[in-house]
């Protein structure tokens, strides 16, 4: 599933987070009702494998990407507050 992000032009300080994100993009935790979030065990393993330090700054960037992805998925499915309709949220 693509979310229209493509390959963005990155500032150098974002390259590690984007590289790590692309490695864990398929590693989601899910339950009977859908996707819950990233599998952080895999995130830590991939960061170690890629020799990317998981600093608080990198984690904030990964979590921002995770939130944006979850929001896009929910909007696509129409199960966000307001049914995915702009201006109808809580």
Image (cartoon, grey):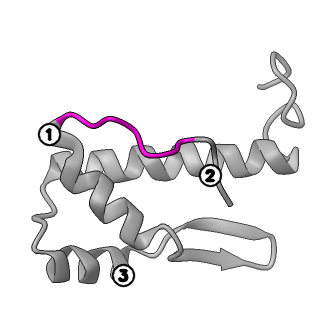
Q: Secondary structure at mark 1?
A: helix
Residue occupying image coordinates x 80% and y 79%: 32
Q: Residues within 10 Å of mark 2 (few under 14, many from 20)?
A: some
Segment tinted magenta in the rendering: 5-11
Residue occupying image coordinates x 51% and y 45%: 6
Q: Which corner quadrant of the image does residue 1 belong to?
A: bottom right
Point out the residue furthest to the top here. 87
Residue occupying image coordinates x 63% and y 47%: 3
**The C terminus - image quarter:** top right
From the viewer's perspective, is the residue at label 1 or at label 2 nearer? 1
Task: Report which residue position mark 3 lands on.
Answer: 42
Residue occupying image coordinates x 78% and y 41%: 75
Q: Is residue 35 magenta?
A: no
Magenta residues, dominant SS class: loop
Q: Residues within 10 Å of mark 1 (few under 14, many from 20)?
A: few
Task: Report which residue position mark 2 lands on.
Answer: 70
Image location (x, y in percent) of residue 22? 40, 63
Image location (x, y in percent) of residue 7? 43, 45
Q: Secondary structure at mark 2?
A: helix
Image location (x, y in percent) of residue 58? 21, 51
Give the spatial CA distance, label 3 vs label 1. 24 Å
Q: Nearer the viewer, residue 4 or 88?
A: 4
Q: Is residue 21 left or right of residue 47?
A: right
């Amino acid at each position: 599933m693509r979310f229209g992000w493509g390959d963005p032009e990155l500032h150098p300080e974002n390259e590690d987070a984007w590289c790590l994100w692309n490695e864990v993009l398929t590693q989601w935790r899910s339950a009977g009702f859908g996707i819950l979030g990233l599998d952080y065990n895999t995130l830590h393993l991939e960061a170690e494998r890629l020799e990317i330090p998981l600093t608080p700054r990198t984690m904030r960037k990964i979590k921002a990407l995770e939130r944006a992805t979850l929001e896009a998925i929910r909007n696509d499915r129409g199960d966000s507050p307001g049914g995915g309709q702009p201006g109808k949220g809580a």
